[in-house]
């Protein structure tokens, strides 16, 4: 276990933003994680758990308590059953399952961050999300003061949400278990039109696992969605806004406002339609690269807000508010941030 006082947090986030932690603890075993959480809770000390810092917007003032960085390791395959320690690097774990010939998380290639954070917002991309393969999450329950095992079906997974996100001060994820599938070297069915097109197949077809993995990485890199320290378009928290899910009445209002333009709409369960945040931002007049200051929209992807090198968290939030307010004025739709805000709000 490593402990530092007054530790800068910006280098631990992909946005490279945020002030210092009063105390930073890096834990390398589950026992160290649990001991740190228990000690902070008993002392009434504010606690912030971080993995890869790829979905966090931390205040310029920093964090006035203990920041626990989870750096545990453990990758175990038993047939098609995978167990990952929370600190495992997600994209490396995905690559290893593809090498092992297993399907189930191959379209989630290149997503930054730790395995332990994947259930928190039910990480998803290109037609796949972890809710489909997670069987169990082992977590320290701060309310019960004990380690619990939650079945995937008890995690209340929905679009970029879960019981962990709904109750952020309760669970610290220690291990995540997945059921993958041996499809004879083939991928899960291709769900996402853009991936199917670029692979030259029909939707629902399977392709070679390695091909699916490589194609997703190629598509993501083209949008600045694979970390590259030399490329400021990747100094982001990924998509900054979730795709709005509208009720039938809200969608009808919205399409009336849109008029001539054709707004995207995808079924999102009974009486609900999901539309595209990127489309809203673009059509409200915020183009790729928008912004004159040190925080701008990515030049490769409208949905990513980026730090060009010298931004502060306040610069980033000013840009986020400008975009949110512009979309509300143009279309009457409220955009909601995807990254977790620490000590700040939109
Ligand atoms: C370039 C880029 C592309 C991205 N693309 C995608 C994408 O395609 N799809 C997608 O879903 N997301 C995407 N993201 C967002 C992000 O990568 C994911 O949300 C990721 O799972 C966050 O992992 P992390 O370890 O970095 O979490 P952190 O940013 O460190 O933490 C995020 C939240 O999870 C909590 N947390 C972290 N670890 C634990 C734990 N062990 N137990 C309990 N709580 C924990 C934190 O307290 C915080 O609330 C992208 C981000 C970037 C920068």
Image (cartoon, grey):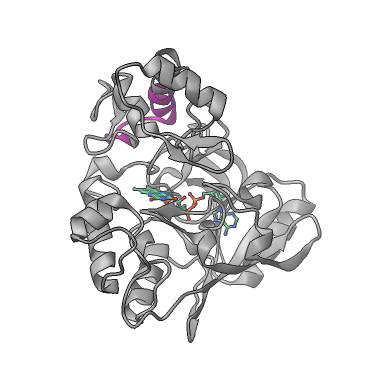
- At a point 49% along the width and 81% down the height, the residue shown is 76
Residue furthest to the top: 329
Which residue range is magenta in the image? 306-320
Q: Quadrant of the N terminus?
A: bottom right
Can you say whether 267 is above or below 220 in the image?
above
Residue closer to the observer: 115 or 8: 115
- At a point 50% along the width and 31% down the height, the residue shown is 336
Q: How far from the left and from the top, in percent, is residue 190?
A: 33, 61
User: In this rendering, does residue 214 appear at all?
Assistant: yes
Per the image, is 318 magenta? Answer: yes
Residue furthest to the right: 144
- At a point 69% along the width and 60% down the height, the residue shown is 154
Residue closer to the observer: 69 or 221: 221
Q: How far from the left and from the top, in percent, is residue 151?
A: 67, 67
Q: Find residue 317 and report its image quarter.
A: top left
- At a point 65% along the width and 53% down the height, the residue shown is 156
Q: How far from the left and from the top, in percent, is residue 35?
A: 70, 65
Residue closer to the observer: 40 or 145: 145
Can you say whether 210 is above or below 108 in the image?
below
């Amino acid at each position: 276990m490593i402990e530092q006082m007054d530790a800068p947090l910006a280098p631990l986030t992909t946005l490279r933003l945020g002030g210092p932690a009063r105390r930073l603890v890096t834990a390398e075993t589950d026992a160290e994680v649990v001991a740190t959480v228990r000690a902070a809770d008993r002392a009434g000390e504010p606690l912030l758990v971080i993995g890869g810092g790829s979905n966090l917007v931390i205040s310029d003032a920093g964090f006035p308590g203990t920041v626990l960085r989870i750096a545990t390791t453990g990758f175990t395959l038993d047939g098609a059953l995978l167990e990952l320690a929370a600190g495992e690097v997600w994209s490396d774990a995905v690559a290893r399952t593809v090498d092992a010939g297993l399907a189930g998380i191959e379209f989630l290639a290149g997503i930054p961050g730790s395995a332990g954070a994947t259930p928190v917002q039910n990480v998803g991309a290109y037609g796949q999300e972890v809710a489909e393969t997670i069987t169990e999450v082992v977590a320290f329950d701060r309310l019960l003061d004990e380690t619990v095992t939650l079945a995937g079906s008890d995690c209340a997974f929905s679009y970029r949400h879960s019981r962990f996100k709904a109750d952020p001060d309760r669970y610290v994820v220690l291990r995540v278990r997945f059921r993958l599938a041996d499809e004879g070297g083939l991928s899960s069915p291709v769900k996402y039109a853009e991936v199917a097109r670029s692979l030259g197949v029909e939707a629902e077809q399977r392709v070679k696992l390695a091909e699916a993995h490589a194609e997703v990485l190629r598509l993501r890199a083209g949008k600045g969605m694979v970390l590259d320290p030399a490329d400021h378009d990747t100094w982001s928290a990924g998509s900054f806004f979730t795709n709005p899910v509208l009720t039938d009445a809200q969608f009808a209002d919205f399409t009336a406002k849109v008029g001539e333009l054709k707004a995207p709409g995808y079924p999102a369960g009974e009486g609900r339609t999901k539309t595209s945040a990127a489309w809203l931002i673009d059509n409200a007049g915020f183009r790729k690269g928008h912004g004159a200051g040190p925080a701008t929209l990515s030049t490769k992807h409208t949905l990513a807000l980026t730090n060009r090198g010298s931004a502060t968290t306040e610069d980033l939030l000013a840009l986020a508010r400008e975009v949110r307010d512009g979309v509300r004025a143009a279309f009457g739709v409220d955009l909601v941030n995807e990254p977790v805000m620490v000590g700040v709000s939109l």
